[in-house]
Amino acid sequence: MDLFKQYGRQYWWPVLGNGAEHDKTFEICVGAILTQNTAWTNVEKALNRLLDANLMTLKAISECSVVKLRKCIQSAGYFRQKTKKLKIFSGWIIKKYDGNWKKFFAKPILEARQELLNLWGIGKETADSILLYAGNKSIFVIDVYTKRLCKKYGVEFKDYDDYRDFFEKGLSRIPSGWSRVEFYNEFHALIVRFGKEKSIAIIHKIS
């Protein structure tokens, strides 16, 4: 818990506040898709543009024009691919689950995960981010910062799920007063915070 003592709670997702009325669960899912291969600051810009354009709902994303959606998320990079991903994801939730998040997240973790992985453009990190942060499912998210931290201490695996198993087994003892979901949520967020600060420190050192 050293990182928690140093940084405190990270309060990840949802990020669009100030009383804005929108689907918070959908915001998290959109954020998880948009954050692929880009900086989070660029994702926040895209999320705010979607909100301003009244596109932060499944129905709105599903029905809006491709041109309009691309323009809104352009700051997040790879906007053509990500537009396609958002369209497919939104249409799938609407068609299969009537737009009802509870129906989808009621499924067992691994079954829900596989459904997400079957969608075009959804990889393991994105699927697990959706399950943990939007669905409150106890699954640990692995990203580049997590792998870098592992490598620093001589821990390396070939497969994403080997890293995930390593963390889930290593974090089997949950601190008093925390749920497993809360602990995974904060632990992952803290690793990212630590990794980003270390990266910034290195850049400053060599610049």
Image: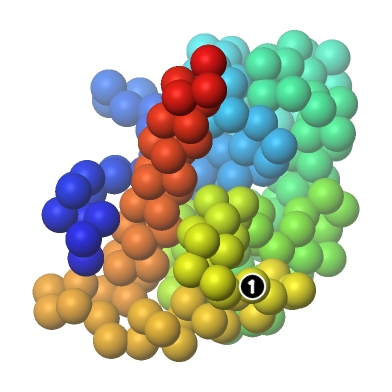
Which residue corresponds to the image point at 38% horizontal and 67% vertical from the top-left?
184
Q: Where is residue 53? Give x, y as percent.
A: 59, 13
Quick check: 57 above or below 107? above
* Amino acid on which the number 1 mark rests in the picture: Glu
- Can you name the residue that lies furthest to the front here? 206
**Which of the two residues, 107 or 2, is positioned nearer the viewer here?**
2
Quick check: 189 above or below 161? above
How is this picture coloured? rainbow
Quarter where residue 72 is shown: top right
Asked if residue 102 can be seen in this view, the reply is no
Quarter where residue 60 is shown: top right
67 left or right of 23 in image: right
Q: Which image quarter holds the N terminus?
A: bottom left
Quarter where residue 148 is shown: bottom right
Q: Where is residue 104? Give x, y as percent.
A: 60, 67
Which residue corresponds to the image point at 27% horizontal and 22% vertical from the top-left?
18
Q: Where is residue 46? Give x, y as percent.
A: 59, 20
Secondary structure at numbered mark 1:
loop
172 left or right of 157 in image: left
Graded by Cα atoms within 10 Å as few (under 14), some (14 to 19) or many (20 or more), the crowding at tag 1 reads some
Which residue corresponds to the image point at 58% horizontal and 21% vertical from the top-left?
42
Q: Mark 1 points at which residue?
A: 156
**Which of the two residues, 4 or 156, is positioned nearer the viewer here?**
156
Q: Where is residue 201? Give x, y as percent.
A: 42, 30
